[in-house]
Image: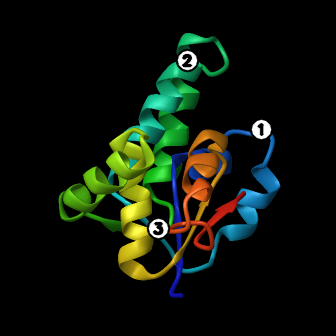
Amino acid sequence: MTGIVIDASVAIKWVIEEEGTAAALALRGQNLAAPDLINAECANILWKKTRLGELSADEAVFAGRLLSNAEIEMIPTRSLVEAAIQIAVELDHPAYDCVYLALAEQRDADFITADTRLLRKARDGERFRRRVRSL
């Protein structure tokens, strides 16, 4: 396997202290990749945290800036859409999450997530059982 694919549930822990932050930080410096969708997903998480009063707007913008400079190889989502749709249908799970699985499969890489629902779905079948790891 080559490298590690991460999703927004992992990356957001680099800038927001929450359960799993230490494990997420331990991944830094490794050969990390993600679909460029991760940027929009992290931005949405930061927006939600401002709505909930957990972050100020300035804190959210700063966290977004830190994430945009993180050392993650960004892969265009467009190259993964077809595979993500097939995986979404197979797993009966939202396609935007399956973009990460498509990338991991394309690269023959491990996929690390803190998303317990996605983890459960991906591990239910044989196809991703050995590739998907919990943060």
Label 1–label 2 contact, CB within 8 A:
no
Q: Position of residue 42 (x, y in %)?
A: 47, 40
108 left or right of 37 in image:
right
Residue beneath the point at 46% across and 59% down: 69
Give the residue at the far bottom of this rendering.
Answer: 1
Sooner in the amino-acid sequence: mark 1 or mark 2:
1
Circle 1 sits in a helix, a strand or a loop, which is it?
A: loop
Label 3–label 1 contact, CB within 8 A:
no
- Please, is residue 40 above or below residue 2 in the view? above
Sooner in the amino-acid sequence: mark 3 or mark 1:
1
Name the disc covering residue 18, or none: 1
Mark 1 to mark 2 CA distance (whole Å):
15 Å
Q: Which residue is mark 3?
A: 72
Residue beneath the point at 36% across and 55% down: 87
Circle 2 sits in a helix, a strand or a loop, which is it?
A: helix
Q: Position of residue 17 (x, y in %)?
A: 76, 40
Name the disc covering residue 53, or none: none
- Please, is residue 31 above or below residue 69 in the view? below
Q: Which residue is mark 2?
A: 50
Circle 3 sits in a helix, a strand or a loop, which is it?
A: loop
- Judge the density around disc 2: few (<14), some (14-19), many (≥20) Cα neighbours within 10 Å: some
Residue beneath the point at 53% across and 66% down: 128
The nearer-to-camera label among 1 and 2 is: 1
- Judge the density around disc 3: few (<14), some (14-19), many (≥20) Cα neighbours within 10 Å: many
Residue type at the position of mark 2: Thr
Mark 3 to mark 1 CA distance (whole Å):
21 Å
